[in-house]
Image (cartoon, helix red, strand yellow):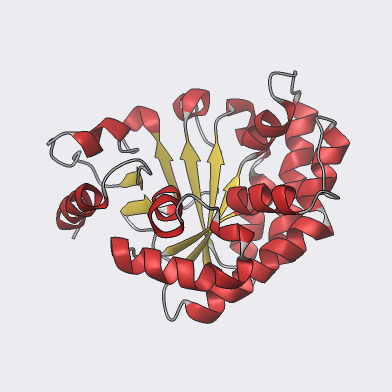
Amino acid sequence: MLVPSCWVDGMAFGQAVLRGGENPWTKPEELGLFHRELASLLKLKLIEISIDAAMDALLEKSPAVSVGNDVEAIEDFVSGSALAGYVARGIDVVLGGSGAMPIALSLPGPGLIARRFMGDAPVDENTLDDLSMALTGLVRAVYREGIDYIRINEIDPRALEFMEPLTNVAEHYQCASVLLLREEAAGVDVPEGFDAIFRDKDGQILPSAWWRNSDEVPQGKKLFVEVPNDMEPEVVLRRCSDLKTAFI
């Protein structure tokens, strides 16, 4: 599966414009409709299913599901049946209404998971390794035929050492593996195994300021784009047209 040269993440924009700021995952039964509407609005080339958003919604809707900053509790949540069942339900709805569009599963990497639940508490490499295995277990539990890409977002350079289980599971399911690197992780060497990598330092992530000025699309062979959620839709659509023209 070829990785799009211009990868567009429209989740935050869609949540703001199409759902008035409400997380679409709070109504998993309507996820298919949400993603069809978003794909039509932004002329997307793929549908991206956000595990981050699923986690947010599950923790908000289910008081019985709680996660503190204890490492074992975090691992249990990530690899547990509550999250897997919730995500699988949403995936099934999206696949049922996606037609022939490619589907991507977007995962927070081990470092992002650790920061989210542990804040500024120290995170050792054993924790990153364990969280990578927990994420791999989640992917195995929710994978469905029809998922074409697995995208991993990471900020902690140490976490890159423990990505092999995730790239192995992507290869096993014949999914293209995509890595998005920001912050400190953007400047380090990456182990082999990924089909595509977008990183800040190489100018492969579109700056947020681009949406608010008249600059041309950055030149390069590939670009990751996150559509902002705080702009007028007319402006976003015009700028998306610029992107589409540049990457035809």
- Judge from the rendering whether residue 194 lies leftward or rightward of residue 111; answer left or right: left
Q: Quadrant of residue 211?
A: top left
Is residue 66 at least partly visible in the picture?
A: yes
Is residue 102 at least partly visible in the picture?
A: no
Residue that appears at 35% across and 46% down = 227
Quadrant housing the C terminus: bottom left
- Judge from the rendering whether residue 186 lies leftward or rightward of residue 234; answer left or right: right
Residue that appears at 22% across and 54% down = 237
Quadrant housing the N terminus: bottom left
User: Residue 137, relative to residue 128: is it above or below?
Assistant: below
Front residue of 4 and 120: 120
The extreme front residue here reads 20
Q: Position of residue 58 (x, y in %)?
A: 71, 53
Q: Position of residue 191 (x, y in %)?
A: 56, 38
Q: Position of residue 159 (x, y in %)?
A: 64, 32
- Judge from the rendering whether residue 65 lies leftward or rightward of residue 224; answer left or right: right
Residue that appears at 56% across and 67% down = 174
Residue that appears at 51% across and 72% down = 32
User: Residue 173, relative to residue 15: is it above or below?
Assistant: below
Q: Position of residue 76 (x, y in %)?
A: 85, 46
Q: Quadrant of residue 87?
A: bottom right
- The total number of labels drawn is 0
Front residue of 188 and 56: 56
User: Residue 169, relative to residue 212: is it above or below?
Assistant: below
Front residue of 237 and 74: 237
